[in-house]
Amino acid sequence: KARIFRFGNKTADGGKNMKNLLGGKGANLAEMSRIGIPVPPGFTITTEVCTEYHQIGKEALIDLLRPDVEEGVRYIEDIMGRKYGDNENPLLLSVRSGARKSMPGMMDTVLNLGLNDEVVTGLVKKTNNERFVWDSYRRFVQMYGSVVLGMKPHTKEDVDSFEEVMDDLKEKRNIKLDIEFSVQDLKDLVREFKEIVKKRTGQSIPSDPWEQLWDATMAVFDSWNGNRAVYYRKIHGYPSDWGTAVNVQAMVFGNMGDNSATGVCFTRDAGSGENVFNGEYLMNAQGEDVVAGVRTPQQITKLGSQRWAELAKVDEKQRLEKYPSLEELLPSLYAELDEYQKKIENHYRDMQDMEFTIQEGRLWILQTRDGKRTGTAMIKIAVDLLKEGLIDQKEAIMRIEPMKLDELLHPVFDPAALEKAHIIAQGLPASPGAATGQIVFFADEADKFKNSILVRIETSPEDLEGMNIARGILTARGGMTSHAAVVARGMGKCCVSGAGALNINYKRRNMTVGDKEYHEGDWISLNGSTGNIIEGKVATVEPELSGELAEILELSDNFSTMEVRTNADTPKDAVAARNFGALGIGLTRTEHMFFGQDRIRAMREMILAESRNGRKRALQELLPMQREDFEGIFEAMQGLPVTIRLLDPPLHEFVPHELAQQKELAKDMHISVKAVKNKVDELKEFNPMLGHRGCRLGNTYPEITEMQTRAIIEAALNLKARGIEVKPEIMVPLVGTLKEFILQEQIIRRVADKVFSERNESIEYLVGTMIEIPRAALTADAIAIHAEFFSFGTNDLTQMAFGYSRDDIGKFLPVYYEKGILTTDPFETLDQEGVGQLVKTGIEKGRSTNPKLKIGICGEHGGEPSSIEFFYRVGMDYVSCSPFRVPIARVASAQAAI
Ligand code: ADP
Ligand code: MG
Ligand code: MG
């Protein structure tokens, strides 16, 4: 079995379909090489070797791998005409991580391997460029110390890191940028860095290039199990047995002088999706500098540069002098880059995120991958690629990550409020969105406030968890391709980067802008679409759906066979869901309707009533209110089907538990406080979720079912009189035995007939049941003879199938994740293996006796893509979910059918 795969010189052993084995980076380096893109030669050590390493350990693995790696290095040496470890004509290497799915910055990479004091001398002779050599050596010591020897710069444990030493030196020399260091400065830095490494790790950097290579390779394998990578895998649900590949590659140098540069580019705009090539570069720099935000980079295209200058308030003359685009500065290299980006995007048929380096006028491409993008960009790019004929309709739909649509439905700043807002400063619009929160300066303190804004000079991969928690991210340094910007777009989180006017002081936990000071805990707002940083809170409004989203949703409906309905209890929710394209209501919970001011009183009187007559009197009061609610919802749905569930929760949820309220109620009802108290105590249950609730209420107090049925039917008839045809579906909750259902059905039909004859008018309606008790799923064939529809209540079904209380699972779920007992929360993602079997059985049995049975689901799972796919496979007619999940479910339903 092959352990290494070579690439370079327009050929390769591997290709883009080998991501599992070569990792995304390795597979794409091979693919680019094949299609004639200039990539520095190298080889990929497979992900399987990573697994081997974790099994057999370092020494055994090196023995196993040595012949292959030596051969691989020879392959690179031959192409480059240099030799690794040679003093006269040295080759330098990079060792780069790369898992099958891109995890930007989550694992480690070491550059400039092969340097030591002797090689440095030789390289100076060979290149005649002392600055370049010592700059590379400085970077090497820094990176090797951090990555291989395990220092942790940029974190709170290690604030006086290399950066601080450099900052001090800059201050001493009165310079701003690292390119302004003299050769002597760089030599001093190398010496000082070596000392820091020694002091902090107790180890020295090995001078043997081969030892460096092996140790760096193992460090990359180790980084697969590093905190950052583990956390990233957790939030993305990637399994830990994938492993990372290691790419060993010839170094090319962007830090050789004024004819050298490095950069990152996107074939389309990752924020808006607009089809414009864009990106950033730094002259005389090495790759990490752009992403890490060491200097604020310049724009690649003229258009981008002009847009940037407008935001940064830089005039045209100054722009051309100080911040020219690559297009203007090095036109022929730009033209070549433009040609490659087109070729690569056409080849991959998706937006690409690429890295490149220019070494003394020669362009090299170092990486390409499908670019991370915002929800807005995801939609726009899919629609555009479809129109451009690069992908077909099915593929356009499959390109949508349904859960990412959520971003498009979040509130945006109210334009009126924005007009009055006080703008503190302006940064780059790195990731769109609206965020308001309290300032925190450290990622691990992002949870200090309910809504926080993480404010950093720049972010690093260590900050991932805090970035995920924060509402928005603000950095003082770094451009549109900085770590903060890329990660924020991937998370769909609002981010403003490179706000140079901010002066951030971590030690004092404040930031100053001009003479104004902001402290930890102060409220600020970020507008990720304009780059504005605003003082205080700004009001928000609901967003409007974009034309492209509407196109994708319509396209989806052409392919899906399963309808999407919504769970809605109020006309407002119903209208929202209809606007999102819901084709009916799958669940209206009637109990929410009893919580209003007068209603709760009437409800309590009903519950506390001693006699059937007392109850009836109270219900009589509730009837018109319920009827009115139903009319509102029916009207909002304009003839679409509406499923109404009869009263479900335990009655004790409605009664007052505090003395003051009990007294008030006693006064209202002209009974003693003691009587009220007694009744409340009487209603207390040991296990309310398994207690007196659902159809058990309707069966003990039939008058409740009678009232609710009357309210539904009368409301429907009232609407019919106004020309709106509604078809209510009356749903009995928590049925476990056939008889429980039949008794309720009889009441419903009897009351409906009575109302019809009173009004001398009728409508069509259905009577069905929820399937949420395991016994009901197992006896569904009997129930289906009587029920006209089933709606799977997967929340209760999960609760009862696992025996996990929905309200208590939080106590043990974290431990269960840790021990691998559960990998997902079964209340979020349907447990297909167990609960799914009950669903499948229920459907099969139900349809076996009633082929016309209409079947849907109304639990939380109705809006979760992987569960939706399952519901499609088992043959459901519809899923029902909360209004904001409707667009997600529409796309997921189409994807299931494709
Ligand atoms: P990540 O996955 O975190 O982006 P990479 O392996 O891509 O890590 O490398 C980090 C940076 O180092 C990138 O900017 C890349 O372009 C640069 N780099 C990696 N290998 C080389 C190389 N052989 N020559 C020059 N620059 C390199
Ligand atoms: Mg990279
Ligand atoms: Mg239920």
Image (cartoon, grey):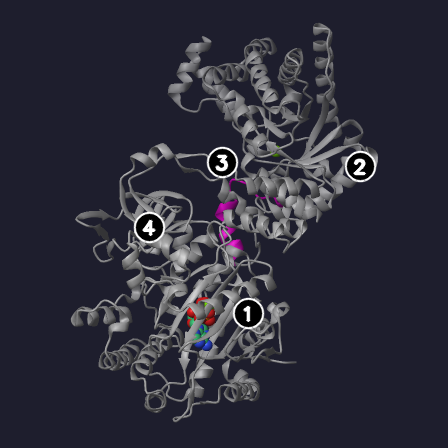
- Please report whichever mark, 1 or 3, sits nearer to the chain's N-terminal start: 1
Give the amino acid at mark 4.
Leu
Query: Disc 4 to disc 2, how far (Cα)?
Result: 63 Å
| Residue carrying label 1 | 243
| Residue carrying label 2 | 847
Are the residues tagged 1 and 2 within 8 Å (C-beta)? no
SS category of the residue bearing label 3? loop
User: Where is residue 312 shown, x and y percent of the image?
Assistant: 30, 53
Residue 290's quadrant in the figure?
A: bottom left
Give the amino acid at mark 2.
Arg
Q: Which mark lies nearer to you, 3 or 2?
A: 3
| Residue carrying label 4 | 311
| Crowd band around label 3 with a 10 angstrom C-alpha radius: few (<14), some (14–19), many (20+) | few
| Visible residue check, residue 746 | yes
Give the amino acid at mark 1.
Gly
- Please report whichever mark, 4 or 2, sits nearer to the chain's N-terminal start: 4
Q: Is mark 4 within 8 Å of ligand 1?
A: no
